[in-house]
Structures are given as structure tokens and as C-alpha cells.
Amino acid sequence: MKLVALPAFSDNYIWMLHDGVEALVVDPGDAAPVLAALADTGLRLAGILVTHHHADHVGGLPALRPHLQGPVIGTGAEGIQGLDREVAEGDVVELLGQRLEVLDVPGHTAGHIAFVLRQPSDGSAPVLFCGDTLFSGGCGRLFEGTPVQMLGSLDKLAALPGETRVCCAHEYTLANLRFAQAVDPDNAELAAHAARCKVLREQQQPTLPSRIDTERRINPFLRSDQAALRASAVARASDSSTPLADDADRVAVFATLRQWKNEFR
């Protein structure tokens, strides 16, 4: 199985998974990169997966429909037009001889889902298609969900096997890592990861996929229970109208970090 990141718009990735004959794509906000890849490779489009309803994830569906030889599968909780099958946590999607599990991961949107391929048929590492819930070094904005929901969703993803490849839908990594280093300046592994990602972008290469075990060590939004992150959140909140107690729970710490990221420049 080959995993390919198809750049779209200014910073989206449409993920393609294929076996040399058939392909599935995830969150095709733009049909053009998918059609170009299919033309270049001669692959048949056997299925489309959709994590949430935002236009930069579903906008290409109508133009891809005439080229599709399989189903469009996505969250059933967001009224997405053009789905052949609506899914939620506990469902299994079978495409290309692979079994992808569906996880509910609300927070960015109310009905956001993720797809996990735990055992690729070729024995390679698991794959997570997480849309806009988890980014390398960051997480999605809370447009429709709550901090409690998003933290629960991130905990669910962080519990996946460490070698799981994290296929985020945006190339936000360098901006996320600048924020992460402001919050967690003494994290040597974070600094090294940021340096590696900077080189990749200078070479016009994706920083993705990341790995779950990497994100556990460098992503502040997966570490809101750790002392260094709590101290940074408390210090940040001390300058606001809603100070954070030293013993605040991790939801409050997470919410402070998320609001800080919203304002970070």
C-alpha cells in the first residue's frame, strides 16, 4: 500500500492510499489534484472518505463523482451532501482489501470523525486519517465543539499505537511548532523536530505524516497534564481577565493553550 499526500489549495493535503491498481482518497476539497494523480498513475478511484463538512474537505466531491467506481463514505452527523454511506464510531469501512475503523472525534466540528487503518495488508505501520482534529504540533480550532470534547478526541487519538502514521489535512506544522516552542521552550526533542521539519519545507517536502509517538512528546495539546505545560498556561492566564489556578484541571489548561494558540502570531 502506498500513501501519498496530494497538495491542494495553499496548505491542504488530500491523502491518497493505493495498491497500484485502485485508490481511495480522503477529504478531497479540490478535485483537480486527485484527477491529475489518477491520470498520471492510471489508478481507479475506488472510494472517498470524508472526515467533516468544511468546504476545503468536501468541495471536490461533485467533480469526482463521474470518475468514482466506489462509495463516498463520511460522517453522518453533519448533513454532507453526496454520501453513499454515513458512518460513526464502531463502524468499519472495507476498501482496497483494507479495514478502516471509524472514530468519533468531535471538537473542530460537532460530527468530525477519523479513520484508522490498524493493520495494513502489507504489514506496514498503521495509518490515521484525522482531518482537522490533530495536526503535527497542534490541533484544530474549536469551531463547533467544546474543550472537553476536543481533549477527549485528542486523548483517543493519542492512545493509538505509537508507530501510527498521522495523516493530517493541513501543512500547519512549522506554525504549530513555533507556538509549541513558545509554550514548551525547554523541550529538546521539540526543538530537534522543528529543525527537521524546517529542512523538509525548505526542500518543498511535506512534514507529514507524523507519528503518534512523536506527537505525544512534542505536541502541547496532547500534554496538558504535564507540569511544564501547566506552568506555561498559568503564566499566560495570569495576564488575562480569567487567571488559571495552579491546580486547574487539564481541561482548563487545554482551553487556555487553545485560546493562546488562537491569538499567537
Image (cartoon, helix red, strand yellow):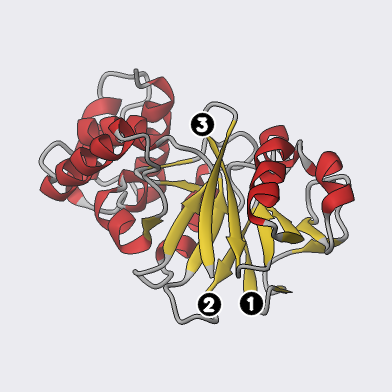
- The residue under label 3 is 11
Amino acid under disc 3: Asp
**Quadrant of residue 22 within the rendered picture:** bottom right
Looking at the image, is mark 2 or mark 1 earlier in the sequence?
1
Q: Is residue 236 above or below residue 72?
A: above
Amino acid under disc 2: Pro
Looking at the image, is mark 2 or mark 3 earlier in the sequence?
3
- The residue under label 1 is 98
Work out whether residue 264 can be spotted. Answer: yes
- The residue under label 2 is 120
Amino acid under disc 1: Gln
Q: Are marks 2 and 1 in contact (CB under 8 Å)?
A: yes
- 78 horizontally vs 9: left or right: right
Badge 3: how crowded within 10 Å, few (<14), some, or many (20+)? few
Q: Could you say where residue 173 lies in the image, as x and y percent from the top left?
A: 37, 38
- Split into 4 quadrants, where in the image is the C terminus? top left
Whole-angstrom CA distance, mark 2 to mark 3, is 27 Å
- 3 horizontally vs 143: left or right: left
Looking at the image, is mark 3 or mark 1 earlier in the sequence?
3
Q: Could you say where residue 166 lies in the image, as x and y percent from the top left?
A: 44, 57
Badge 1: how crowded within 10 Å, few (<14), some, or many (20+)? some
Whole-angstrom CA distance, mark 2 to mark 1, is 6 Å
- Split into 4 quadrants, where in the image is the N terminus? bottom right
Badge 2: how crowded within 10 Å, few (<14), some, or many (20+)? some
